[in-house]
Image (spheres, rainbow, N blue to C red):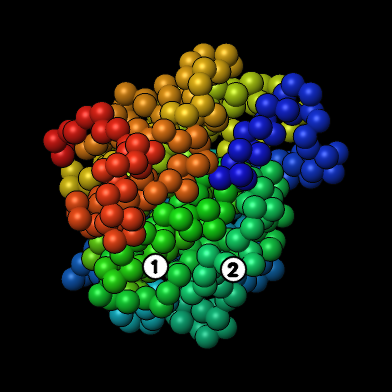
Amino acid sequence: MRGEWRGFLGLFVVIVAGALLSGCTLLNLREESKLLEQVSEITGTVQGEAPDGKPVVVVLLGIDPAQPDRPDALMARTILRHPGHFKFFAGPGTYRVSAFVDLNESASYQANEPVGWHEQPKLLTIAGGERVSGLTVTLRPPEQVQRLYPEVNDPSTIAAKDLSQQFKVGVVTSLDDPAFTPANGTLAFWEPIRFLGLQTAGLYFLEPFDPGKTPVLFIHGAGGQPGEWKSIIEVLDRHSFQPWVAFYPSGLRLDVNRQWLSNALARLQLQHDFAKIHVVAHSMGGLVAGGLINRLQASGHGDMLATFTTLSTPWGGHELAATGVANSPAVVPAWYDMVPGSLYQEELFATPWPAHLSYQLFFSHRGGYNVMSGGNTDGVVSLASQLLPAAQDRAITLRGFDEDHTSILRSASAGCALARVLAGPQACDQHLPAGALANHPSQHGTTLMGRPQQ
């Protein structure tokens, strides 16, 4: 994964010499960092009943203060399996938080659906960079809403622009999509706001949705892009599985990326009613995916998860990230979460994963000793970070590969090992010459330990 290598190499050079990044890129990173510092976290709880187990849709509405009764835009939405906790991220502005029970599962409010707001309702004016917490949204019966708040069903009120669609969800494309380039992957890491302006971020399908096939979501790492999964996807049994790929602004805070991925999967399950999904992630993408699992569990969607496999994930962070945060003239936001022992990492392992989830930890070890990491690496990430004890404790199997940090994505052995996780021990044989797995040492991973599923 060349993009990720440039990302971490760029971190080293910014710290030591400042020679890799152009002055323009460094200036843009500084300007983007100032804008991102203005992003606020909004959290709260929906209370009330959702009849018949129907989902609850929570929306963040942008409000024009000159017309406070008429939302200007739907900024974001999140879907809960039942009333509970929600989270949004937003820049400076005026907002209203609302929720409704989605009786017809359309993800759009209808007049006959229970609905509620924060404090009947209350506008939130956010200056930026705040943490707004403790909001409570109480669901009300539709007849009460029609009596007390008739303006809710005014067509001009419910026809607000839907800006929550900025991330593409379920668009069908191929791994040869012109947007899936190393240059865009690098841009997504160093200049995530500029990357978002390209409107290429999203969760993509590589074929039209097929209810007879189980989805497999692939999540790249820092500076990566979906095309890097090509070799591994080529050995996927396409008769049984349908690959989905994420392309996200990897320079943003990991909590932001796991949040939009969680929202996207909840929307897709509501739309397509798939029962299970497998999640596969490389490098920092594993940290995003781990947080995604926690978020799906909290929103009541944890039962959709079947297996989780990570390749070369720095579960313990990256040793250079702390130095970058302390000394770099401009900080990529994701570095904060990559500092060893960061709050994101602590919260990741403080939450149990679903008991039925089968986790496979694949690691790469061709890199030798690195003095800055204080131990052996795969050329980018230390083995100590990949094999963090907390991650090992959650793994059904640990499997090592004689590959470096990026070559594992092109490894026939890793691809076949994943295929067998998904489809069983006979998977992948048709994709290799007869006897290749038995006779070619480079095709073998090393299974260190099998663990009982918890």
Which badge, 1 or 2, comes first in the chain's sequence?
2
Find disc 1 in the rendering and name its residue.
267
Find disc 2 in the rendering and name its residue.
177
Please state the horizontal and vertical placement of residue 191, each as a whole percent of the image. Answer: 70, 47
Horizontal side, residue 97 vs residue 161: left or right? left
Give the camera-side residue of 136 and 424: 424
Please state the horizontal and vertical placement of residue 194, each as a whole percent of the image. Answer: 72, 55
- Which image quadrant is residue 313 in? top left
Pick the quarter of the image with the C terminus: top left
Q: Is residue 411 in view from this perspective?
A: yes
Horizontal side, residue 247 vs residue 311: left or right? right
Residue type pointed to by label 2? Asp
User: Measuring 56% from the left and 54% from the top, which residue is drawn there?
Assistant: 225
Please state the horizontal and vertical placement of residue 284, each as a whole percent of the image. Answer: 49, 40
User: Measuring 29% from the left and 46% from the top, which residue is drawn there?
Assistant: 437
Mark 1 and mark 2: span between their CA atoms? 23 Å
Secondary structure beneath label 1:
helix
Pick the quarter of the image with the N terminus: top right
Secondary structure beneath label 2:
loop
Please state the horizontal and vertical placement of residue 127, each as a whole percent of the image. Answer: 67, 47
User: Measuring 51% from the left and 21% from the top, which residue is drawn there?
Assistant: 368
